[in-house]
Image (cartoon, helix red, strand yellow):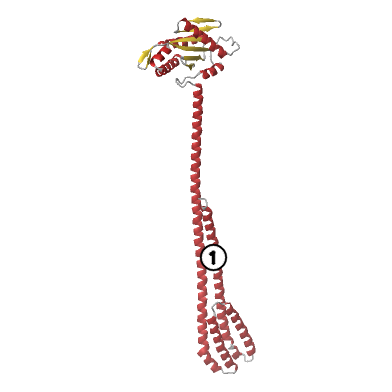
């Protein structure tokens, strides 16, 4: 659900943007309230100054014009402040009424009626001024409280937005980490499955190679493997083994019994061969033994072992059967090949030796000498 992450990021950005805008706006409102409080304080001070200015006419009888000019300047400033204040209609009326009383009091002072001016001040001027002072103080307090509320709301909104943004980003990081770990696990599983597939493929290739070079019944190397062995010049002698009287057993007991007998023969051939020798099944009832090291004496010894081992009775299909082995031996005498290859020469000579043994009555071995045959 990849579409969720951009939306969560967008919501976090909107929260931060909205909180920033609200913070700026609320702090601006707070500054405006501070300005209002300052203006109210200045207005209060101007009213005090205006109240005290009229008594300068008593101290200096020659200054009415100057006092009137100062008074006009003060009232102009008061009007300018009142114009900037919102919702100051009632305050404007109170100040206008207060000015009317001050003007009457100033008129009485101007004509020397000090006692009447004092009486007017006690009766109307002072109470009106006290009410104005209370109203201004109340408005100042309201402005201060409004400024504090705006600051508090701004800080609270910013804090909530920051917390929400942090939570959203943390949630994204958590989901990203979880997805990353899931991806990593999937990658590891994929690599593991790939390795398993490669191992299986290698096993299959090894099996195919083994099957291509080995007999499926006895698991012995086959004719192809023998060709490779003879071509590598890794042998000094070759024995060809042909089983005697195998066909009657196979015909009488069946092919399953024949296969069982061939497996038993393969086991005995392996036991009769030397440690470094290789037993090969050529096909049907024909086998071969590659003697890797030694001389003609070693090859003859292996041939004797083979004839003796195969001559022992076999237990097959619940009965005992006897067969024999005719073995032809060809030895590399170091004189080189005849142009067809050393391996081909050994195979041909071993086959000729085995054929002569078959003609002589089976059940023995013969060693082929270059141009002659020694039978035993």
Q: Residue at x 54, y 84 (%)?
A: 93
> At which x and y percent is residue 156?
49, 64
Residue 102 position (above or below residue 210): below
Q: Position of residue 300 (x, y in %)?
A: 48, 9
Dot 1 surroundings within 10 Å: few (below 14), some, or many (20 or more)?
Answer: some
Tally of marks: 1
Q: Which residue corresponds to the image point at 51% horizontal and 80% vertical from the top-left? A: 135
Quarter residue 337 falls in: top right
**Where does residue 145 sit, x and y in percent of width and height?**
50, 72
For residue 361, above or below residue 30: above
Residue at position x 52%, y 73% in the image: 144
* 292 vs 197, nearest the viewer: 197
Asked if residue 280 shows in the view, the reply is no
Q: Secondary structure at mark 1?
A: helix
Spot occupied by residue 14 in the image (x, y as percentages of width and height): 54, 60
Identify the residue position indicated by label 1 in the image: 22
- Judging depth in this view, the residue of 247 and 49 nearest the camera is 247
Nearest the camera: 15 or 323? 323
Residue 116 visible in the shown view: yes
Location of residue 315 with respect to 148 vertically, above or below: above
| Residue 217 sits above or below residue 333 on the image | below
| Residue under the point 54% across and 65% down | 22
Q: Residue furthest left?
A: 318
- Asked if residue 176 lies left or right of residue 252, the reply is right
């Amino acid at each position: 659900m990849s579409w969720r992450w951009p939306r969560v990021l967008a919501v976090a950005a909107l929260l931060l943007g909205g909180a920033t805008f609200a913070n700026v706006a609320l702090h601006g409102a707070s500054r405006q309230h501070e300005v209002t409080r300052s203006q109210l304080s200045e207005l209060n001070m101007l009213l005090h100054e205006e109240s005290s200015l009229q008594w300068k006419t008593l101290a200096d009888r020659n200054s009415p014009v100057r006092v009137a000019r100062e008074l006009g300047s003060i009232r102009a400033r008061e009007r300018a402040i009142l114009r900037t204040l919102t919702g100051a209609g009632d305050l404007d009326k109170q100040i206008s009424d207060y000015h009317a009383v001050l003007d009457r009091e100033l008129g009485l002072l101007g004509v020397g009626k000090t006692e009447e001016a004092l009486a007017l001040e006690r009766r109307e001027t002072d109470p009106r001024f006290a009410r104005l002072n209370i109203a201004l103080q109340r408005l100042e307090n309201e402005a201060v409280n409004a400024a504090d509320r705006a600051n508090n709301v701004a800080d609270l909104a910013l804090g909530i937005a920051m917390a929400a943004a942090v939570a959203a980003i943390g949630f994204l990081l958590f989901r990203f980490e979880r997805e990353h770990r899931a991806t990593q696990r999937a990658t590891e599983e994929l690599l593991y499955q790939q390795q398993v597939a490669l191992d299986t493929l290698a096993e299959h290739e090894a099996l195919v190679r083994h099957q291509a070079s080995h007999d499926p019944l006895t698991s012995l190397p086959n004719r192809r493997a023998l060709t490779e062995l003879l071509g590598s010049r890794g042998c000094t002698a070759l024995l060809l083994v042909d089983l005697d009287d195998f066909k009657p057993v196979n015909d009488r007991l069946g092919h399953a019994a024949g296969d069982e007998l061939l497996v038993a023969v393969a086991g005995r051939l392996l036991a009769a061969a030397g440690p470094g020798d290789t037993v090969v099944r050529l096909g049907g009832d024909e086998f071969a033994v590659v003697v890797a090291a030694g001389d003609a004496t070693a090859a003859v010894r292996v041939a004797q072992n083979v004839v003796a081992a195969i001559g022992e009775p076999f237990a097959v299909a619940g009965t005992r059967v006897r067969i024999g082995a005719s073995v032809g031996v060809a030895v590399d005498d170091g004189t080189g090949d005849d142009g067809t290859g050393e391996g081909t020469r050994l195979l041909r000579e071993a086959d000729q030796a085995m054929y002569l043994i078959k003609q002589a009555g089976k059940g023995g071995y013969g060693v082929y000498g270059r141009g002659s045959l020694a039978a035993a």
